[in-house]
Image (cartoon, helix red, strand yellow):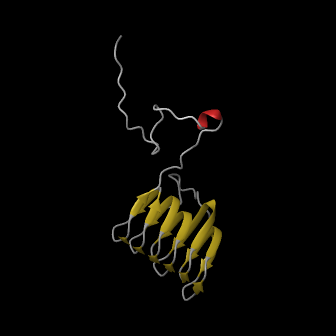
Amino acid sequence: MFGSDKRGNRSMAAITTLVAEGTTIRGDIEFSGGLHMDGSVEGSISAQGDKAVLTLSEKGRVHGEIRAPNAVINGQVKGDIIVSERLELAANARIDGNVYYKVLEMAAGAQLNGKMIYQAEPQRQLSGPKAAETDETDPPATGKDSRVKSTQAA
């Protein structure tokens, strides 16, 4: 399940903030650690830190953009979701917006009205004098080398 490795150890942040059912927040939220939402937010949600986790329960609602390294969505979101590490869309997830992800787990029943856009690792840039030079043998900007290489015997 999300947030644990094969040995069952929790690798993500524990819940440090709770937005309870019946609570509505109008404005942006910034958090670190773990945010569990049973209430609703009219504004953007953004996480600080590499291990931060947003959990939106089936009662939770967000009308705005979500940015977090890790998220479990089981409620309604009207806005884009940008997750840099792992996104889980549970069975009751209802998304009206684009989803940007690196790793995605989607349960049967989850609904998405928008685009699913894979975000690979950010490209590393060379440093020093060779960074300014480019030649024909450099791989394309996509990071994938689509050229076919062949060798011939002399």
Left or right of residue 106, residue 23 in this image? right
Instruction: State the residue in front, 50 or 128.
Output: 128
**Residue 147 lies in what quarter of the image?**
top left
Instruction: State the residue in front, 66 or 21.
Output: 66
Horizontal and vertical percent for residue 37?
55, 77
Residue placed at 36% from the left, 20% from the top? 151
- Residue at the top extreme, as displayed: 154
Horizontal and vertical percent for residue 4?
53, 58
Is the residue 5 above or below the residue 97 in the image?
Answer: above
Q: Determine if residue 126 is in view.
A: yes
Q: How many marks?
A: 0
Is the residue 32 above or below the residue 11 in the image?
Answer: below
Residue placed at 59% from the left, 69% from the top? 46
- Residue at the bottom extreme, as displayed: 22
Horizontal and vertical percent for residue 76?
44, 78
Residue placed at 36% from the left, 10% from the top? 154
Left or right of residue 142, residue 125 in this image? right
**Residue 130 lies in what quarter of the image?**
top right
Q: Determine if residue 14 is in view.
A: no
Horizontal and vertical percent for residue 30?
64, 72
Left or right of residue 154, residue 99 in this image? right
Residue placed at 35% from the left, 24% from the top? 150
Is the residue 139 above or below the residue 152 in the image?
Answer: below
